[in-house]
Amino acid sequence: MSGGGHERRESGRAGLELPVQYERLNALLSDYTHNLSRGGTFIRTDRPLPVGTALSFTIRAPELGEPIVLRGVVRWVVGAGEARADRPSGMGIGFIYDSPAHREALEARLDGLMVQSLGALAFEKLMGKPAPSEPSGETPDEP
């Protein structure tokens, strides 16, 4: 594994498989998240981008209504040769926020998605805080 940063998580991580789209070398790629937290995600792919690569990507799910558009940086990679059944190949992405308000709005949407996908009790156990009473459907202003 390159980069190694996944052991330093600041928040709980939910095992959610959601469609994600991003560009690579002028091609639109579609892969899936393997897990999701308020600070980042792991995108399962056989074609991970190099550590340090900045990218924009879109997470789609029926529960969301509008897709979530995020920006992030590849923090670590699991190459195809390092992958196992419990650790697929792919890339760990750390989210980039434009401002504290942007971060707060995106985190509210991610919290809402996790509550809808996992249920309130599982969210509370995973995140160590009360589940939001009503998941936020608002999209933060784009930069």
Image (cartoon, helix red, strand yellow):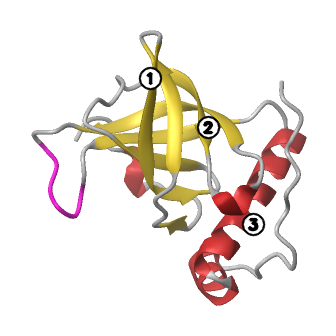
Q: Nearer the viewer, residue 17 or 96?
A: 17
Image depth: mark 3 or mark 2 in front: 2
- At label 2, counting other C-alpha atoms closer than 10 Å, the crowd grade (few under 14, some 14-19, many 20 or more) is some
Q: Which residue is mark 3?
A: 112
**In which image quadrant can residue 56 be found?**
top right
Determine the secondary structure under disc 2. strand
Q: Nearer the viewer, residue 24 or 66?
A: 66
What x and y, as percent, mark residue 9? 50, 57
- In the drawing, does residue 141 fall left or right of residue 115? right
Image depth: mark 1 or mark 3 in front: 3
Residue furthest to the bottom in view is: 121
What x and y, as percent, mark residue 64? 73, 57
Q: Residue 52 shows which numbered tag?
A: 1
Q: Nearer the viewer, residue 125 or 115?
A: 115
- At label 3, counting other C-alpha atoms closer than 10 Å, the crowd grade (few under 14, some 14-19, many 20 or more) is many
What is the three-letter code of the residue carrying label 1? Answer: Gly
**Magenta residues (range):** 82-87
- At 59% from the left edge and 63% from the top edge, which residue is drawn? 11
Whichever of callouts 3 and 2 sits on the residue coming sooner in the sequence is 2
What is the three-letter code of the residue carrying label 2? Answer: Thr
**In which image quadrant can residue 31 be found?**
top left
All told, the count of numbered labels is 3
Distance (Cα) linking label 3 and label 2: 16 Å
Q: Nearer the viewer, residue 141 or 92?
A: 141
Distance (Cα) linking label 1 and label 2: 19 Å
- Principal secondary structure, stretch drawn in magenta: loop
- At 28% from the left edge and 29% from the top edge, which residue is drawn? 47
What x and y, as percent, mark residue 143? 83, 24
Residue 85 covered by magenta stretch = yes
Q: Mark yes or no: residue 110 visible.
A: no
Q: Which residue is mark 2?
A: 58
